Amino acid sequence: VDACIHLRADQSRIVNNRMEDCLFGIDIAESDDNLIQDNHISSYDLELGLRGDAMRLWYSKKNTIRNNTIRDSRDIVIWYSGDNLLEGNDVAGGRYSIHFMYANGNIIRKNRFDGNAVGIFLMYTEKTLVEENLIRNAAGATGLCLGMKDTSEVQIIRNRLIYCSSGIYLDQSPFQPDTENLFKENEVAFNGIGVLFHMS
């Protein structure tokens, strides 16, 4: 992977770096208990789908990703990775602000996602907290603040989901029998569609 930093270690610190003109920013695989903080990441000046991911976690847990600034990259990807904290990050000009898949027990708190094609998308994910984030200006035909597919026991609390084509998209969520997803004290405003239920 053409990345600025490959992380394959536990209990490391990646702090106060500026990563520019690299396809992928930080590629993290099978690495736990790391701190990724106060970095600036941007990709190549290419069409959105051709850019690399700003950050990718693969089978990595208990990492703290805090106060990073990401501009004009593709996605933050959290796949098969649980119990991570993503807090205070500022992401703009990308595709998926954060895309979770098979990633349980993560906390997404007090981030700012502005002008990305999609804010947060949770797929096949359980027991996750999404709290006090600002997601706005996800425009276009597929623009979406928050998407959930086959998710269970997720808490969506005190988020601002504004100025998107769709505020919330629900597809077979909750997925597991006898479970619930909690939506509490969110602001869903000025979207083309407030809440879209698809097979839910």
Image (spheres, rainbow, N blue to C red):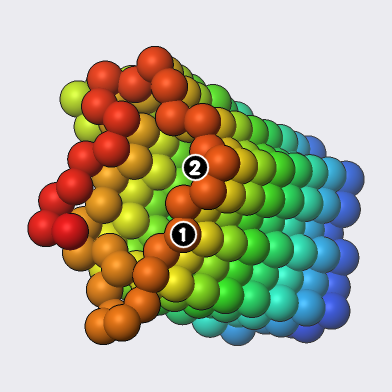
Say if 13 sits above or below 177 in the image. above
Residue identified by numbered label 1 = 182
Rounded to the nearest angstrom, the CA distance separating label 2 from label 1 is 22 Å
Residue sitting at 39 percent across and 16 percent down?
190
Residue 94 shows which numbered tag?
none
x, y (%) of residue 86? 67, 56
Amino acid at pointer 1: Leu
Label 2: which secondary element: strand
Mark 2 belongs to which amino acid?
Ser
> Which of 115/159 is in front?
159
Nearest to the observer: residue 121 or residue 7: 121
Q: Residues within 10 Å of mark 2 (few under 14, many from 20)?
A: many
Residue 79 placement, left or right of 15: left
Asked whether the viewer can see residue 117, the reply is no
Residue 47 position (above or below residue 130)? above
At 21% from the left edge and 40% from the top edge, which residue is drawn?
196
Q: Is residue 196 visible?
A: yes
Q: Is residue 83 left or right of residue 34?
A: left
Label 1 SS? strand
Q: 95 above or below 149?
A: above
- Asked if the residues shown at circle 2 and circle 1 are in contact, with their CB atoms under 8 angstroms apart, the answer is no
**Total numbered labels placed on residues in the image:** 2
Residue with the mark numbered 2: 97
Q: For the point 11% across and 58% down, which residue is it? A: 199
Q: Picture coordinates of residue 10 (x, y %)?
A: 78, 82
Of all residues, the one furthest to the left in this rendering is 199
